[in-house]
Image (cartoon, rainbow, N blue to C red):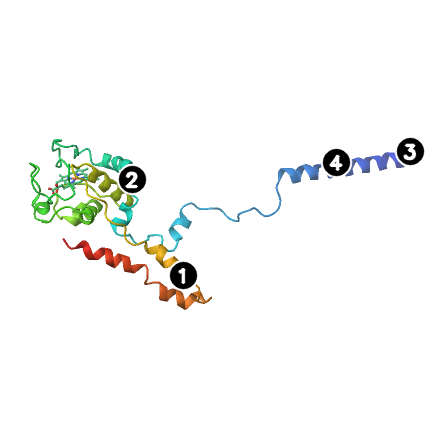
Amino acid sequence: MDDRFNTIAGWVLFAGIVALGSSIVASEMYHSGRPDQMGYPIEGVEEEGRPGGAAAEQPIAFYLASADLAKGEDVFKKCVACHTIDKGGPNLLGPNLWATLGHPIGQGRGFAFSPALASKGGNWNWENLSDWLKNPKAFAPGTKMTFAGLGNPQDRANVIAFMNSKSDSPLPLPAAPAAAPEAGDAAADQPGTGTDDGPQKSEKEPVPKAPEEAAAAPKAH
Ligand code: HEC
């Protein structure tokens, strides 16, 4: 009787140890608890949903202030199929682009410009060169330059700065427009504006617009 009791007790103990052991192993294998992040991340969604994602573009002078010649030379690789830019370089599908800034638009260079570009008038400057490179067809409907355009304003500023350097007398870069965002922030930080952000914020909103208008003024040819 005693013997049998010991045998049964032994098996019960053994079964308990096995059960305990396997539950420890299982909890190691299957992490329980809440994951750090719930749900499945879907790439790109956050990007698109960001309020103000398609931020309004600043005047080109803003991007020229941080233009990078080396990056501009890189961007110009998109142009070399049709353009040379060294002094005395040949015309290809498009004209040689030595000393473009300040040069009359669509004139000379021993190149047969389209009437669309030749009739534009004026000289190339920071703004109209930016407009042209952003969307050649919109700038001069009927142009022969079959190039889609450079949508990224910093790419445009970089390549324009690079083009400006390819000249006997590069122009000084335009003055950066008065730092609009910083001016706005400074006003927001000023003491005495109260704690309620709501209605005051809308009062401040027009502030960053001022430099844009100022930069638009000298646009006249
Ligand atoms: C597919 C060929 C092609 C590509 C690529 C191309 N262009 Fe042109 N480009 C032309 C042609 C053709 C013209 C003449 C347009 C006309 O007469 O309407 C031109 C004209 C120009 C002019 C006017 C020159 C002047 O003296 O008035 C500039 C500036 C210019 N291109 C810059 C660029 C830049 C910068 C790029 C690269 C970002 C570029 N182009 C890419 C073909 C091209």
Q: Which residue is mark 3?
A: 3
Circle 4 SS class: helix
User: Amino acid under label 3?
Assistant: Asp
The quarter of the picture where the N terminus appears is top right
Residue 149 lies, in percent from the top left, at 22, 43
Residue 121 lies, in percent from the top left, at 9, 49
Disc 2 residue crowd, few under 14, some 14–19, many 20+, Cα 10 Å: some
The CA span between labels 3 and 1 is 87 Å
User: Amino acid under label 1?
Assistant: Ala
Circle 1 SS class: helix
Q: Does label 3 or label 1 sit earlier along the sequence?
A: 3
Circle 3 SS class: helix
Q: Does label 1 or label 2 sit earlier along the sequence?
A: 2
Q: Which residue is mark 4?
A: 18
Which residue is found at the position 61% from the left and 42% from the top?
Answer: 31
Mark sitting on residue 123: none
Residue 22 lies, in percent from the top left, at 70, 37
Q: Which residue is mark 1?
A: 188
User: Amino acid under label 4?
Assistant: Val
Q: Quadrant of ligand 1?
A: top left
Q: Nearer the viewer, residue 75 or 8?
A: 75
> Is residue 29 left or right of 195 when viewed as pictured?
right
